[in-house]
Amino acid sequence: MNRIVFLLLLVFLCLPAAARHIVGGEIELVHVSGNIYRINLIYYLDVQNNPTRDPEAEERVIQVGIFRKFDNRRLRLKPLTFWSRTSVEYTQPNCSNGGIITDKIVYTDTIQLRSNAFNHADGYYISWERCCRNYNSVGLVNIVSKEPPEGTVDFPNAAGQTFYMEFPAVVWRNRAFINSSPALFRPLSDYACPGKQYYADFSGTDPDGDSLVYSLVTPLNTVTAEAVPANGPHPGPYPDVRWESPYSLTNVMRGSPDLAISREGLLTVTPSFSGVGLYVFGVRCEEYRGGRKIGEVRRDFQMYVVDECPTAVPPQILGRTLSEGTFTHDDIMNVTFPAGMPDANRCIEVRISDDDINNLADGFAEEIELHAVPIGFNADISDILPAITSARLTRTSPFATFRVCFPECPFVNRPFQIAFIAADDACSLPNLDTLLVTITITPPLNAPAVFVTNDINEQFNEGSGIKTWNIEAFDADGDAMDITALPLTGPTSLAEAGMSLTVNPQTGNTRTAIFQWDIRCDVFDFTQQTVFPVILQVEDADQCLFKEPDLLNMNLRIILPLNSKPIISSLGLTSDRFDDSVTVERKINESLNFKVLGHDENGDMLTLYGEGKDFALSDYNAIFRQEESAGEVESPFAWDLRCGPIDLRLKSSFTFHFIVQDYNNKCRFKYQDTLVVNVNVSPPDNRAPALSVANTNPDLVLAADNSMNIILGQPISLALTGRDPDLFPQPDMLTMSLVGATGTVEPSGYTFTSSPAQSIVNGTFLWEPDCSIFVNRVYENDYTFTFRVSDDRCFANLADTVTVSLHIEDVDGSDDKFLPPNFVTPNGDDKNDYFAMLKLDDAGELVNILPLDNCAGHFERITIFNRWGRRVFSSGSREFQWYPNGEAPGMYFYHIGYSNNEYRGVITVAYSGKDQ
């Protein structure tokens, strides 16, 4: 009985008046035509806590992600456009208490799912991430859901929602696979009351008739706490939300009993009296076809438990037969109606009452409704109810009586049950009472149609012509008869097997048909199937149209001619030459060579040929010539694996089928044997290139560790050489590049040149840095330059690098040893006749003794004054020479100016010793 009540709740919730509430949502994928599908994203907005939110204005377009389950790779980022916004109504609108205000938001667009892109056996999924859910601060009870700080991405206490839906490949076993996801899920629209059973129909419908199974799951969180991920939805797997203690998937609401969902989609819970607030939970709807799971839809919801609800008692429904004076049947009732009973007598009466008519809070009145639900069969039984199935009960009119009449023909040809349900207008959900009636109706007498022809068991030689059978059926009542053939078991249809059924017009109580089977050559390949269990059925159109056919079994068999099967083998491929499935490994630039042979012990004509699975041999320069011969046939296979045709990024495994066929089968259906060779191709062997560097400026030294010290003004010139030892099948092409240039100050002004070349590649680095490389009065810098040479060997590229370290210092402009001369004797003896910044070096050569110019400072001018301050000489040349001819003997003063320094001194000019 509990099982029946459970089913009645589920069926009652399917009645048109029902509607439900939810804050959450789901994704739908609906087939339109061909490879065009429509994606619908439905989410339910909590208007109570978002009164000013306008999705149409704020978020006109959203983006869902489409991912491949096998590797979680995102294949598409699909925009969906706002479509509609509607309010979700209560089951009992008068029960609204303002605690739940929900709008249904729909986004949609079409998408093309091509078979060459969506064909992976593991299937695909669509997701959309949104953060955040309602927070604990506004009454969310059972999961951790805190408001993240503004701009925060990683916030573990946030609770977002990931909308998630899986769908299958659009091809299955080389045929188009059309599927739409489950749809038409009802939203939750009602609040729950402590201590009172809450029930809701969460079942959807499947447009394709697939089986749907429901279960509770932990709701999915989002990967981050972003309101909407900046780059679209993240790939899965997605994290679960975190339950608050003591809640869990097995203790979602601390109800008694707790929240549960049946496999058929009926949600039930009786909340505890201490459980006021919002509760989040998730439902998974899995979709099966032919026993294989093909998809799933996940929905998250919020259920609102209020602190108290109006007290209400359930209605009561009682029954009686027309011959009984009082309503005595409660819960169950059994009635029997014999054949031929008048329609007016084939009835019962039910009476509904409700004690809430004595409740002032209900206005001393109660609205009730009567519903009828079939149990254990599917049929439209709405006609058994009266035209009016509702009533208003009051203290002056405390009962509502309804007469229910049954048809002459029972809904099924056996005793059947109908549940009559009384529903009141209690808040937030109607209270129910059920009367389960078992009805036995004897249908009008009928003699079923039967076959006169007996069952048939026959066998024939293949190709022996057209076979014909005359079929006869008889109906004693003279009812119209229909003779049909049931589909064959297995993949073959009647027409494909050469079978046909021709039914003749009925004559009186007899109807005949002709069953024909064409087993001539070329009609059907009987090597694939030789046994054909055919079933014919005859059904009469009796008054009640019960389906009780008579069956005629035709067990038909084909005898194939004797002929031995050809045998395929190989040489040079594997140690077992008769192994019919071989896997070998090869690298690019290697070769695969072997011989394929065919043998037929009957000496029949053989054909030997090869083909690639999903490719042509010529696409990859593989060679295998088709050969024909009697009894024995052979052909060599040769494949030189090269980079050009083979792209390992697209394909690295190649399957070759080698087939030998025997053409001597009677109906030219070929006996054959097959050798399958799987070749797994890996990148080629490769030896890495080597890169070396040499200094080409003889004034500089490149150390063994590739470091070099440079004084500003010394040109830097490097010659780089890359060499690669690989020559087969052709030399590798080398490319040299400068891959890194860093320093104390970012380097600039250098040049690097190189052109790709085979086997040996050269490069040149040139740099003449100037004072611009020094900044902040720091006059020494360090630089690192990294050079790289790489080869182009396909899918196995290797490289070498060389790093050169440069230390560059400014010219030493110190004056530690600067001691200017201070005496001049211009007496014409060519000795010390002029004043200059010169001295003799160890080799007797005159050298300039002025501090050297550098980036810190440089020589600008020398000026010489006499004792009265008159300028007697000035020069901007470091190589100046002052001849004081005609100047008076005595002391002179000089000033040497640098851009960053100055020097002053005294010069004595004497023409003879007495002038000193």
Image: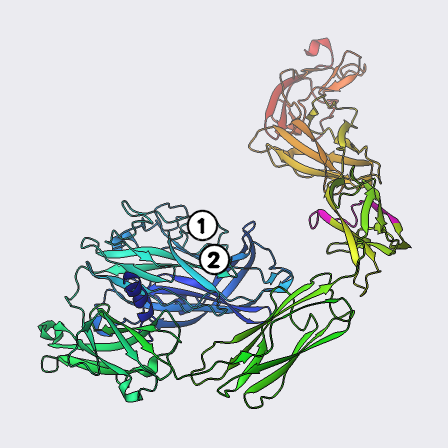
> Quarter of the image holding residue 354?
bottom left
Q: Nearer the viewer, residue 459 or 849?
A: 459
- Part of the protein shown in magenta: 634-654
Q: Position of residue 416 (x, y in %)?
A: 34, 73
> Quarter of the image holding residue 378?
bottom left
Q: Height in image: 608 above or below 176?
A: above
- Residue displayed at 69% across by 29% down: 804
Q: Mark 1 points at which residue?
A: 238
Q: Where is residue 76 in the image (x, y as percent from the top left)?
A: 56, 59
Q: Which of 601 and 864 is in front in this view?
A: 601
Mark 2, other Cα within 10 Å: few <14 / some 14–19 / many ≥20: many
Label 2's element? strand
Q: What residue type is labelled 1?
A: Tyr
Q: Is residue 389 visible?
A: no
Q: Nearer the viewer, residue 916 or 406?
A: 406
Total number of numbered discs in the rendering: 2
- Residue displayed at 24% across by 58% down: 270
- Residue displayed at 34% across by 58% down: 261
**Horizontal side, residue 403 vs residue 87: left or right:** left
Q: What residue type is labelled 2?
A: Ser
Is residue 651 within the magenta segment?
yes
- Residue extending furthest toward the bottom: 508
- Residue extending furthest toward the top: 913
Q: Nearer the viewer, residue 171 or 239?
A: 171
Q: Height in image: 478 above or below 488?
A: below
* Label at residue 127: 2
**Horizontal side, residue 307 vs residue 851: left or right:** left
